[in-house]
Image: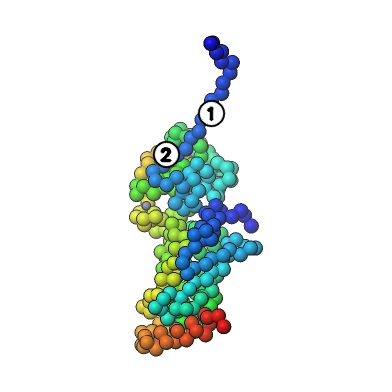
Amino acid sequence: MSQLPKRIIKESQRLISDPVPGITAVPHEDNLRYFQVTIQGPKESPYQDGLFKLELYLPDDYPMVAPKVRFLTKIYHPNIDRLGRICLDVLKKNWSPALQIRTILLSIQALLSAPNPDDPLSNEVAEHWKRDEQDAIATAKEYTKLYATEQ
Amino acid sequence: MKVTIQNWHSIFAWHWDVPGDEVCGICRVAFDGTCPVCKFPGDQCPIGKFFDCLFCFVILRSHVGHVLTFCPAIGSCHHSFHMHCILKWLDTDTSKGLCPMCRQIFTLENSNNKEVFEALSGRPSPLEEGILEQEGTPV
Ligand SMILES: [Zn+2]
Ligand SMILES: [Zn+2]
Ligand SMILES: [Zn+2]
């Protein structure tokens, strides 16, 4: 593998020296482009008190292309599918190299606070959300308790 | 006291006169260094290699004139990048021709670099046509 670009080194260092509240991102020893991420469920969201594991990978073309991010922890959310894939504009068509790992993780945290069933990835969940929001939120809380809290 | 200078040598330093940050908005490397793709001017850079023959052109037109990919590209919006970095970005579909920082259409402010930019982004420049003529390529 070629040498790690300076930008990635700088970003990794800053994630450790100046972490974002509620978020951790640690590069893997063997592959410095692969990060193990955790995001705390935001307060006042159905994900509160949950700790969600994610994986983030910086493709060779990064920062010309967005990082690849996926939830590893099961989560009930209209914009996250069963495989943990996330529907978020800044990860696709609105990516810009001015964005960073940090800003992307913040956007994901914000997405947990503000699910958007009108731009869904997981159709069933979005349908549920639109049909009966209270019930969907209850399911999301259940999932959080089941899968995102340390036993 | 009388001093006789027996010999002296001069030292100089240079750096790019770029507004705002001293680093590229894309790769965050200083403009006085190469972009992450290039190790040395010309040698390693795929764009530089292709346009080797344009070096004289660049040396004539830009004051330091080191290498094409060395030139910072300063946008009309005053955001600046390595020439190579911004070209790579503008080449992607996602960019839609926009500045990574402010998402306005990216245009160059500085007319010297504009020629380099046009040459690099493959649009016909007078010099390219000149080369084709020298090689006797029939039209
Ligand atoms: Zn750059
Ligand atoms: Zn380059
Ligand atoms: Zn700009």
- Place of residue B29 in the rendered image (x, y in percent of width and height, measured from the top left): 50, 48
Label 2 marks which chain's residue?
Answer: B
In front: A37, or B64?
Answer: A37
Instruction: Look at discs 1 and 2 and give the one toward the viewer.
Output: 1
Q: Amino acid at mark 2?
A: Asp
Q: Kindly indicate the quadrant of the structure image that contains residue B97.
A: bottom left
Please, is residue B93 above or below residue A40 in the view?
above
Q: How packed is label 1: few (under 14 Cα within 10 Å), some, or many (20 or more)?
A: few
Colour treatment of the image: rainbow
* Residue reaching furthest to the front: B1
> Between B1 and B75, which is closer to the camera in this rendering?
B1
Q: CA distance from mark 1 to mark 2?
A: 19 Å
What x and y, as percent, mark residue B47?
52, 47
Residue at 44% from the left image edge and 70% from the top image edge? A108
Mark seen at residue B17: 2
Query: Which residue appears at 61% of the width and 53% of the height?
Result: A3
Q: Is residue A51 above or below residue B61?
A: below
- Residue that appears at 56% across and 65% down: A26
Along the viewing direction, whichever of B45 and A120 lies nearer the viewer: A120
Q: Percent x, y for residue A103? A: 44, 63
- Give the amino acid type for the residue marked by disc 1 in the picture: Ile
Residue A101 visible to the viewer: no
| Residue position for label 1 | B11
Residues B139 and B32: in front is: B32
CB contact under 8 Å: marks 1 and 2: no
Q: Secondary structure at mark 1?
A: loop
Q: Chain of mark 1?
A: B
Q: Total label count? A: 2
Q: Who's the residue at 43% across and 57% down the image?
A: A98
Circle 2: element type: loop
Label whose residue precedes the other's in the sequence (1 or 2)? 1
Residue B67: where, in percent of width, then height?
Answer: 51, 39
